[in-house]
């Protein structure tokens, strides 16, 4: 009998596992899967790296490796085209990539994409200065003007605020044409502009009770704008956001719940990814809360039961298997 290098390697691994004891014997081997994240200085890279490390502990070798990616818009393209096997993206962009033929992804959609799990959400906030009418956006159709900061072009906040304003009948160009000011830029610059009375509405898509939101509210006795139900419904049904509420008392002076939406951060893969490794990815995430918090402190405000919520594209069977075991529907 001819023993190939592959067979010999498998035999050595099997003997080593039997000698190492029960824990090692439960380990398995698997082809290498690439997990594409964000830039190495952001929060997505350590998040993906921690998940990969935990998954690798149940395999011989390192079947998952984390690499930097191009972010929420680029990662679905990389995974859908086979350049990576797992990735991170935001729910709205993942939905648009799946469907195709839209403003972000003009070509055919990647209908082979599948959702794996939902991570730490970011919440859409609109902070209005004390001396500005709370219903100012409703009054735009009657000729009122507004000075609003919307984030950097291409950012998740820029995207969200544009979709919100469209529900009031305006895109950014139309708003500026009627005399309003739409201010783009980095969030810290916009926060400073709000504090210095250069804009009257500061927006951000960020974790609740974050320091920059606290500072913005304190700077101008700001109030959080609740999103009307029709606006929330469109953001959820058309754009892939998740209904959310900022509970009363989250910020100083906030006496009522504020209805808004969350921007889901989703792990994605493709339909042909092995069920077992997808199952282990979800298991690693859901059963290692403390370790995930070490990778990114934002997991401190996240509950493992949220991994199955707000997934905007079809679920991978490996993830569905884990959710059923936990009784999550």
Image (tube, rainbow, N blue to C red):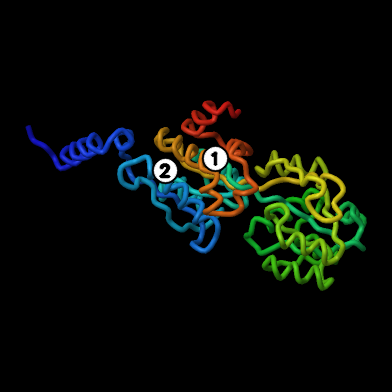
Residue 275 figure quarter: top left
Q: Nearer the viewer, residue 321 or 22?
A: 22
Residue 27 figure quarter: top left
Q: Nearer the viewer, residue 251 or 103?
A: 251
Q: CA distance from mark 2 to mark 1?
A: 15 Å
Marker disc for residue 117: 1
Locate the C terminus by quadrant: top right
Q: Which residue is mark 2?
A: 55
Marker disc for residue 85: none
> Is residue 325 positioned above or below 278 on the image?
above
Element type at mark 2: helix
Locate the N terminus by quadrant: top left
Residue at 40 percent across and 33 percent down: it is 276
Residue 101 x, y percent position in the rendering: 58, 46
Residue 30 x, y percent position in the rendering: 32, 40
Residue 70 x, y percent position in the rendering: 50, 58
Element type at mark 1: strand
């Amino acid at each position: 009998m001819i023993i190939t290098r592959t067979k010999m390697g498998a035999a050595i691994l099997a003997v080593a596992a039997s000698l190492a004891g029960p824990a090692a014997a439960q380990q398995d081997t698997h082809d290498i899967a690439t997990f594409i994240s964000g830039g190495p200085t952001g929060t997505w890279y350590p998040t993906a790296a921690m998940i990969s490390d935990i998954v690798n502990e149940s395999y011989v070798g390192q079947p998952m490796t984390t690499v930097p990616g191009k972010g929420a818009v680029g990662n679905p393209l990389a995974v859908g085209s086979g350049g990576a096997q797992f990735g991170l993206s935001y729910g709205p962009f993942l939905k648009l990539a799946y469907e195709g033929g839209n403003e972000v992804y003009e070509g055919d959609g990647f209908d082979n994409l599948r959702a794996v799990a939902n991570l730490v959400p970011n919440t859409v906030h609109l902070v209005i200065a004390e001396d500005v009418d709370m219903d100012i956006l409703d009054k735009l159709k009657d000729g009122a003007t507004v000075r609003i900061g919307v984030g950097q072009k291409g950012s998740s906040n820029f995207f969200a605020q544009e979709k919100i304003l469209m529900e009031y009948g305006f895109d950014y160009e139309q708003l500026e044409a009627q005399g309003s000011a739409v201010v783009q830029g980095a969030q810290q610059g916009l926060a400073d502009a709000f504090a210095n009375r250069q804009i009257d509405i500061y927006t951000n898509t960020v974790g609740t009770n974050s320091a920059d939101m606290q500072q913005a509210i304190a700077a101008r006795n700001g109030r959080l704008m609740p999103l009307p139900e029709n606006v929330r419904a469109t953001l959820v049904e058309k754009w892939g956001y998740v209904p959310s509420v900022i509970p009363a008392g989250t910020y100083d002076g906030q006496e009522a719940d504020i209805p808004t939406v969350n921007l889901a951060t989703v792990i994605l893969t493709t339909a042909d990814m092995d069920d077992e490794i997808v199952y282990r990815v979800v298991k690693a995430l859901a059963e290692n809360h403390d370790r995930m918090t070490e990778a990114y402190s934002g997991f401190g405000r996240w509950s493992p039961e949220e991994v199955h919520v707000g997934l905007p594209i079809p679920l991978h069977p490996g993830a569905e298997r884990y959710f059923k075991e936990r009784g999550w529907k």
